[in-house]
């Protein structure tokens, strides 16, 4: 996962492919996706904070309620609307006011990627070939105004975020891709009548049951149900992209006033939330405040000074503070340096000339100085050099894969020049590198790559954009990419869920290419990779699926569509007043829902 007023969001460029006859998905799926109970840390002893303790344990466990939890971010939400967001921090934060069908287990380590019910009464039930999934939701769930949450509200939420020319642009479109009998549905904004008429891919036989009917067997479908898009939306309250101004809460907190883009978002308790129905939300603070558009260096300093509790972006402190915290013995105990499932990389566009030539793309990968790219991310504390796409923790990852090796990771300039000659650009060529202006490490990565490529005559101009629009309007818009010659774009990606499909499909599958909010920024449309993505989720055996994910990773590297930089290590600062702090593998940052504070 990455990273409006209703406006057209173009459908996929190619008609959806239909997979061949589905294969049975039986007991192995149920075992793979079985939920585990949340970690119980209430009333435990206060732990002694140590460097990186939050990667594997809960720091300062506490049940104490009260106080104000203070967040800040240098950019902004892509949208606080749960149906219109794709940034990992937004998925994490939206749980304060948006409950989803399923959610991750509350626990550090690998357990945190396991699933459990949230709005759902129990885990989904699949038919024999996993083409139909039934979910029953709990009774007695209520919105902030006391009205009942129904299955139809969840169906409506999925419709508004996935279907029709005015579908919300920022989030993924898994439901659009997977649901049967929905290709002609024009979305809830296309009619003055019943907004769900013609939306037959989800059935609601009663107020507490949803039946998802899929085009084909999809063994990993329960992971799709953790998405914020499954948070209920009362149709009468929906205002399209303006709904973000005041989202109607189904969780323990509600908006205090309106969201003010570029300024603030404040939350207070939702008295209609029933803790007995919610096993994963501690809801410890009385109030939550987010300040938006604060300079990253100021955020870092305010964290250390005790004037702030959490950096909302979850990407860690900036370069100026990293070295200080790691080396300061008085602060190291308040620092975590976890290895995340986030790949920091550069998209190499396969359509923008001359990078539409494979040899030119390969020249970029050979010329790249991976050592300098790692240093741009803070050296060893910033990340581990990546030579493949999938993080090591995901089944099918091959850390030994290195198709563009070089001495000391400095780049193979001789091979780069050979590839330039092969693609008809022996003297090099010009292109542009896109980066998020408010992400210092992104900019440093662009600068390091610019210097690397200059060694073989590739002249790369750096163009900077704000991160809150980058994924949708600049890097995420193929038209903008082409018009501005963005042959290279600095990016980062965390899994939508912990599998090769959950990590790679949106950035490598040709069917994922979109005209807005595009995450396949390289515009890779490789028939073999597309076929593998279609086939892999019909396969019952997880080991067989892992083998296909290895093949997809290797072929994408052979196509030089992505230049991996590092598998990120973040430097996260946790002020001493913060309670229940731990790194959550599902969100690749702290678990925001567990946090409390000892400050008033």
Image (cartoon, rainbow, N blue to C red):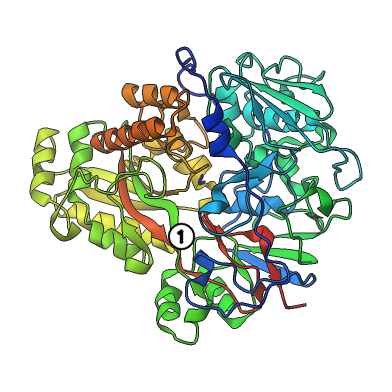
Image-based side of 504 in relation to 149, left or right: left
Quadrant containing the C terminus in the rendered view: bottom right
Of 78 and 594, nearer the camera is 594
Is 227 drawn above or below residue 574 in the view shown?
above
Task: Decide: few, some or many residues near mark 1? Use Cα within 10 Å; few <14, some 14-19, many ≥20.
Answer: some
Of 329 and 256, nearer the camera is 329
Image-based side of 187 in relation to 233, left or right: left
The quadrant in which residue 14 appears is top left
Answer whether residue 293 is visible to the viewer in this image.
yes
What count of labels does the image hold? 1
Give the residue at the far bottom of this rendering. 330
> Label 1: which residue?
439
Image-based side of 274 in relation to 62, left or right: right
Which x, y percent locates residue 530? 38, 24
Answer whether residue 87 is visible to the viewer in this image.
no
Q: Which element is circle 1 on?
A: loop
The quadrant in which residue 513 appears is top left
Residue visible at 67% across and 41% down? Answer: 102
Residue visible at 84% across and 28% down? Answer: 207
């Amino acid at each position: 996962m990455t990273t409006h007023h209703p406006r057209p969001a173009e459908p996929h460029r190619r008609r959806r492919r239909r997979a061949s006859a589905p294969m049975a998905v039986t007991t192995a799926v149920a075992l793979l996706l079985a939920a585990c109970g949340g970690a119980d840390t209430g009333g435990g002893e206060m732990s002694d904070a140590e460097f990186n303790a939050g990667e594997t344990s809960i720091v300062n466990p506490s049940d104490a309620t009260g106080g104000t939890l203070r967040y800040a971010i240098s950019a902004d939400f892509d949208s606080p609307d749960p149906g219109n967001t794709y940034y990992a921090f937004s998925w994490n934060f939206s749980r304060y006011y948006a409950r989803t069908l399923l959610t991750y287990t509350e626990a550090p380590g690998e357990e945190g990627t396991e699933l459990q019910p949230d709005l759902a009464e129990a885990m989904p039930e699949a038919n024999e070939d996993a083409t139909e999934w039934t979910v029953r939701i709990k009774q007695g769930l209520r919105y902030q105004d006391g009205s009942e949450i129904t299955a139809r509200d969840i169906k409506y939420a999925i419709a508004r975020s996935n279907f029709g020319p005015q579908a919300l642009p920022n989030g993924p479109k898994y439901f659009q891709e997977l649901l049967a009998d929905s290709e002609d549905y024009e979305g809830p904004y296309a009619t003055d009548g019943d907004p769900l008429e013609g939306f037959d891919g989800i059935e609601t036989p009663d107020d507490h049951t949803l039946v998802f009917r899929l085009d084909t067997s999809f063994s990993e479908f329960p992971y799709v149900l953790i998405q914020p898009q499954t948070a209920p939306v009362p149709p009468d309250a929906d205002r399209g992209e303006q709904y973000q101004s005041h989202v109607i809460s189904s969780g323990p907190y509600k908006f205090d006033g309106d969201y003010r883009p570029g300024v603030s978002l404040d939350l207070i308790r939702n008295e209609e939330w029933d803790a007995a129905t919610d096993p994963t939300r501690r809801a410890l603070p009385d109030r939550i405040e987010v300040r938006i558009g604060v300079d990253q260096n100021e955020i870092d300093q305010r964290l250390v000074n005790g004037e702030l509790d959490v950096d909302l972006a979850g990407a860690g402190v900036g370069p100026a503070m990293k070295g200080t915290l790691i080396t300061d013995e008085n602060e190291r105990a308040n620092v975590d340096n976890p290895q995340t499932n986030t790949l920091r990389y550069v998209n190499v566009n396969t359509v923008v000339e001359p990078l539409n030539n494979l040899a030119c793309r390969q020249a970029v990968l050979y010329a790249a100085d991976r050592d300098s790219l790692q240093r741009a991310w803070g050296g060893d504390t910033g990340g581990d050099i990546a030579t493949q796409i999938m993080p090591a923790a995901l089944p099918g990852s091959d850390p030994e894969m290195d198709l563009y090796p070089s001495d000391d990771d400095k780049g193979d300039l001789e091979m780069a020049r050979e590839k330039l000659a092969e693609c008809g650009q022996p003297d090099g060529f010009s292109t542009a590198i896109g980066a998020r202006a408010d992400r210092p490490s992104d900019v440093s990565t662009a600068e390091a790559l610019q210097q690397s490529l200059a060694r073989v005559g590739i002249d790369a101009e750096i163009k900077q954009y704000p991160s809150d629009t980058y994924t949708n309007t600049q890097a995420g818009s193929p038209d903008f990419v082409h018009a501005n010659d963005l042959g290279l774009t600095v990016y980062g990606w965390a899994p939508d869920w912990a599998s090769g499909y959950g990590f790679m499909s949106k950035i490598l599958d040709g069917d994922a290419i979109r005209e807005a909010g595009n995450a396949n920024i390289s515009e890779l449309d490789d028939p073999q990779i597309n076929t593998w993505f279609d086939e892999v989720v019909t396969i019952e055996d997880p080991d067989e699926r892992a083998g296909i994910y290895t093949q997809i990773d290797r072929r994408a590297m052979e196509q030089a569509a992505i230049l991996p930089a590092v598998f990120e290590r973040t430097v996260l600062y946790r002020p001493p007043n913060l309670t229940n702090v731990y790194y959550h593998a599902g969100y690749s940052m702290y678990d925001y829902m567990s946090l409390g504070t000892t400050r008033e």
